[in-house]
Amino acid sequence: MDRTFHESFIALMNEQVGDETEALLDALRQEPAVSVRFNPKKRGLVPEGLLMEGARVAWCEDGIYLDKRPQFTLDPLLHGGAYYVQEASSMFLHYAVRQLAGERAICALDACAAPGGKSTLLHGALPPGSLVVSNEYVRNRAHILAENIAKWGYANSVVTNNGVEDFVRDKGAFDLVVVDAPCSGEGMFRKEPEALRQWSLDNVAMCVARQRQIVGNAVCALKEGGLFVYSTCTFNRKEDEELGDYIEKELGLEEVTLDLPEEWGIVRGERGYHFYPHRTKGEGLYMSFYRKEGTEGREEKRKEGKRKGEKGQLREIGKIWLKNDEDYEIEEVEGRIVAFAKTHADLMRRIAFGKNALMAGVELGVMKGNKFVPSSALALSEALTGNVERVDVDKETALRYLRRETIDLSGKAEKGYVVVQYQGLPLGWVKNLGNRSNNLYPEYWRIRKL
């Protein structure tokens, strides 16, 4: 494709990187690198040698580069949440969180989360037992986010479809808030040609105004002493360092820095860190880190009294379908039976009932009449009991299942709900009727024929 850069963009880069500008522009004319990040909780389910191999991403132990881009859609391991296709520079959040977030389980808000790269990364990078609330304002993107989070399979997950301003009243609820802000997309010019065509100084100014509004609202949800992460996929100072000025001077946060190996090629800016594609193997990225003044966050007080989730039928469902069911509180939320981890139940409950939550905790399923129907998210969840029937299928059958076609399990399983697996990795449910089976894979998840 023709990559002709706007004169104003070249001028900005000349001011910013000086005599490296031509090297940067040359890098933006090249094809992007391909990288994936493995799911640490599901990696062990897949036999050795079946996962893709490649050079490791230096700042993320679960990330690798691939020599070429495969047809990911036709790999059942992707649909089962064994890995996530993510640009390597964005994986830097893994390194930063490991260094700055501490060792105790925390509550995190990913405020602009779709399609799910940073949220799925947080689940693997944060201490065990941490809660990640993933929010997306745009409705159709929020549904894609919910699908990706469900497939990733971590129990301590919430997905909401709200404006960031809706979290202002959750004052001090989160130990970590991440804002991967909508931006002018300079760092994605070679991956997204539309970003190059739409770039202008006016668009940069519009992005800055929106970024200030989002950041100002998001900071309200951060506890005292909490960590705030601001990132963009752009290069210019107006959306990066100057936005950092606003975070420090207007919002009162203080920047924190990282210890970085020089050989990684990451550039320390006036504040924050730049990934330039002529220096690092990845797309353009900016990321900076801040602490909110104070040392103590607001403690979540557990509510007393009998909850709906403790009623007999719901509790029995938990005992049947959950591993370690005693670790969860079972409730009905808008017709869905869900399990909240007890360590975060109050916050999860408040969000589930108080915001537009697309998923909260582990969705167990729904009651249809007096019969329970398990959800697809449960089949993919770490919380699913090991006592359910499972059938491993070959790749051809797995792809038929993922297209929502009928598959034959004759003689392979007992009647009832059965988890379909590929190479030991759960994909979803069928209801085996003996002479045939009903494919219960969600219509909106299915692979369209290529």
Image (cartoon, rainbow, N blue to C red):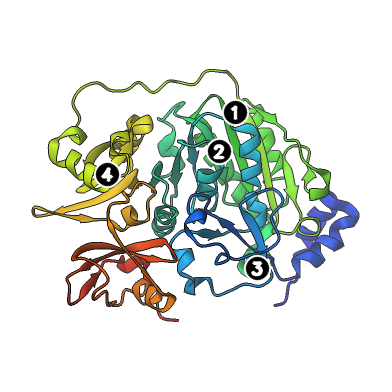
Q: Residues within 10 Å of mark 3 (few under 14, many from 20)?
A: few
Q: With 127 as the anchor, is 131 left or right in this view?
A: left
Q: Are marks 3 and 1 in contact (CB under 8 Å)?
A: no
Q: With 13 as the anchor, is 156 left or right in this view?
A: left
Residue topped by disc 2: 215
Instruction: Residue at 65%, 68% (x, y): give it.
Output: 197
Residue topped by disc 1: 251
Q: Compute the Cα span from label 3 to label 1.
A: 34 Å
Instruction: Residue at 40%, 58% (x, y): give it.
Output: 147
Q: Are marks 1 and 2 in contact (CB under 8 Å)?
A: yes
| Residue 212, position as x, y percentages in the image | 58, 40
Q: Quadrant of residue 1?
A: bottom right
Check disc 3 and report its element: helix, strand or loop.
helix
N-terminal-most mark, 3 or 4: 3
Q: Compute the Cα span from label 3 to label 4.
A: 45 Å
| Along the line of sight, the residue nearer the viewer: 448 or 424 | 424
Q: With 286 as the anchor, is 349 left or right in this view?
A: left
Q: Compute the Cα span from label 4 to label 1.
A: 37 Å
Instruction: Residue at 66%, 73% (x, y): give it.
Output: 68
Tag 4: residue type?
Answer: Val
Check disc 2 and report its element: helix, strand or loop.
helix
Q: Compute the Cα span from label 4 to label 2.
A: 31 Å
Look at the image and tell me whether residue 184 can be seen: no
Q: Quadrant of the C terminus?
A: bottom left
Residue topped by disc 4: 338
